[in-house]
Image: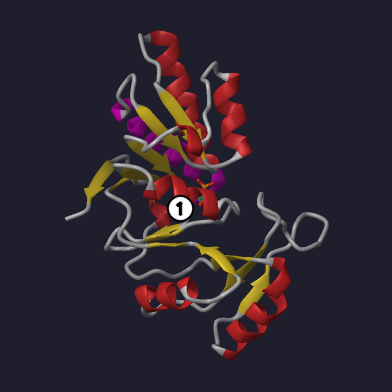
Amino acid sequence: MDKTEQDQLKKEAATKAAKVVKSNSVLGVGTGSTVAFFIDALGERKEKEDFNLKHIVTTSNRSKKQLEGLGFKVDELADIDQADLTVDGADRVDDNLDGIKGGGGALTLEKNVAINSKKIIWIVDESKLVHHLSGFPLPVEVLPVSAEQNFKRFEEEGLKPQWRLDENGERYVTHYGNYIIDLAADPIPVPHGLADYLDHTVGVVEHGLFLDMCDEVIIAHSDGTIEDKKRK
Ligand code: 5RP
């Protein structure tokens, strides 16, 4: 699939998700190129119908800027209790609707917005689908103070760590001043086991395994169909 076709699929999934957002609700908005199409579609609804949102929280400055450019007011997570719905993209989604996220480096806020949402929908093109989580390095956000030790331990565990670098070849620094180590161990045989290990590793701020969280995935397929897969 080339980029133009993939973008078209991302747009279709995003447009479908924008239709299910209830006016006057509290919405969480994720990060990424698919979400950018979703934000555009929200803007179109705002222009064409009586549609607005009570509160919006986002998971990145990129999404915030785009929403504000379309006339939406964006709040901080601390200003709301819970979102009614969060719509986000994903890097990989498996048969259980578990996912890898954080390709854009926004995983910590993404997970925080997600767990403070009544419902989570991911929007993806079919290239993101896998039977078992694989095919994408797992991002792990780590505190700089213990990052070297974390890296060595991950190596010893056979998790194939790689520092994420920015466009200048320097270590990528997250919104919170931390580094990202991408784990290239692939596939991830026991996602819950790895999540548990990372959750208990000192110095790990957050990781990109989003397990048992997503309620629904809207998938745009290259045969023109849009699938709505719900958690059983
Ligand atoms: C950012 C994310 C994104 O949702 C994920 O990387 C998907 O991005 P895209 O829609 O551009 O493919 O998790 O941290």
Depth check, front residue: 84 or 38 = 84
Q: What's the magenta bit mostly, secondary-structure-wise?
A: helix
**Image: magenta residue range:** 1-20
Residue wearing tag 1: 111
Which image quarter holds the C terminus? bottom left
* 65 displayed left or right of 189: right
- Residue 42 on image: x %, y %: 43, 23
- Residue 184 on image: x %, y %: 56, 75
- The quarter holding residue 202 reads bottom right
Depth check, front residue: 49 or 177 = 177
| Neighbourhood count class around disc 1 (C-alpha, 10 Å): few under 14, some 14–19, many 20 upward | many
- Inspect the magenta stretch and tell me whether residue 89 lies in it: no
Which residue is drawn at the image coordinates 59% and 90% (left, top)?
156
- Residue 109 on image: x %, y %: 53, 49
Which residue is drawn at the image coordinates 34% and 46% (left, top)?
221
Which residue is drawn at the image coordinates 62% and 77% (left, top)?
161
